[in-house]
Image: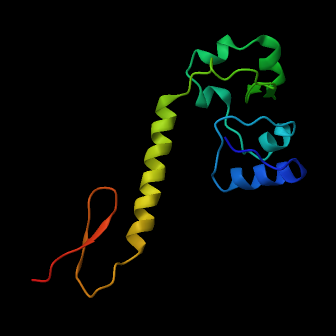
């Protein structure tokens, strides 16, 4: 869990979201601005398909904007939320791909010939022939 300083909370959250660092749960009063800036995903995109139907109506309405649900206004317990595993796997693959691309940009010195390494983008030095 990460706790942010209340004095610049909104600025830190906005910067993290724009940088692609998305929290699993975010409790904030300024979510309307983040929805308007297209920084939040709809609840239906990140939860198990049946989960939004189990929301308490008052919370579901409070967590929506323009007819779309973005979350629950007040999260009292996240144990009942069921994550969308397909979305989580897609995010993991994307992060691994980025990490592999980043590793591929760096070369190992020593004058040895470089070969592409295992699937994760690692680079290893090959013995000179």
Q: Residue furthest left?
A: 129
Q: Answer left or right for 27 relative to 94.
A: right
* Residue at point 22%, 81% (across, down): 113
Q: Residue at x 87, y 47 (%)?
A: 6
Is 27 left or right of 86, judged from the image as shown? Answer: right
Question: Quadrant where the N terminus lies?
Answer: top right
Taking the spot 78% from the left edge, 12% from the top edge, the residue there is 57
Q: In which quarter of the view is residue 81 placed?
A: top right
* Colouring rule applied to residues: rainbow
Residue 48 quadrant: top right
Where is residue 94? Give x, y as percent: 47, 50
What's the residue at 76%, 21% (across, down)? Answer: 76
In the figure, 22 relative to 105: above or below? above
> Quadrant location of residue 108?
bottom left
Q: Position of residue 47 (x, y in %)?
A: 59, 25
Tally the marks.
0
Q: Nearer the viewer, residue 108 or 115?
A: 108
Choose between 112 and 54: the one closer to the eye. Answer: 112
**On screen, 112 above or below 60?**
below
Is 64 placed left or right of 78 in the picture?
Answer: right
Placement of the C terminus among the 4 image quadrants: bottom left
User: Horizontal and vertical percent for residue 88?
Assistant: 50, 36
Point out the residue furthest to the right here.
7
The residue at the far bottom in this view is 111
């Amino acid at each position: 869990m990460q706790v942010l300083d209340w004095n610049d909370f909104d600025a830190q959250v906005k910067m993290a979201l724009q940088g692609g660092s998305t929290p699993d749960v975010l409790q904030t009063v300024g979510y309307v601005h983040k929805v308007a800036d297209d920084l939040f995903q709809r609840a239906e995109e990140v939860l198990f398909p049946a989960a939004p139907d189990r929301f308490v109506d008052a919370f579901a309405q409070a967590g929506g904007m323009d007819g779309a649900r973005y979350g629950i206004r007040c999260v009292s317990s996240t144990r009942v939320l069921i994550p969308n595993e397909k979305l989580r796997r897609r995010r993991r693959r994307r992060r691994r791909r980025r990490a592999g691309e980043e590793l591929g940009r760096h070369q190992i010195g020593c004058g040895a010939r470089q070969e592409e390494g295992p699937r994760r983008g690692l680079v290893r030095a090959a013995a000179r022939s």
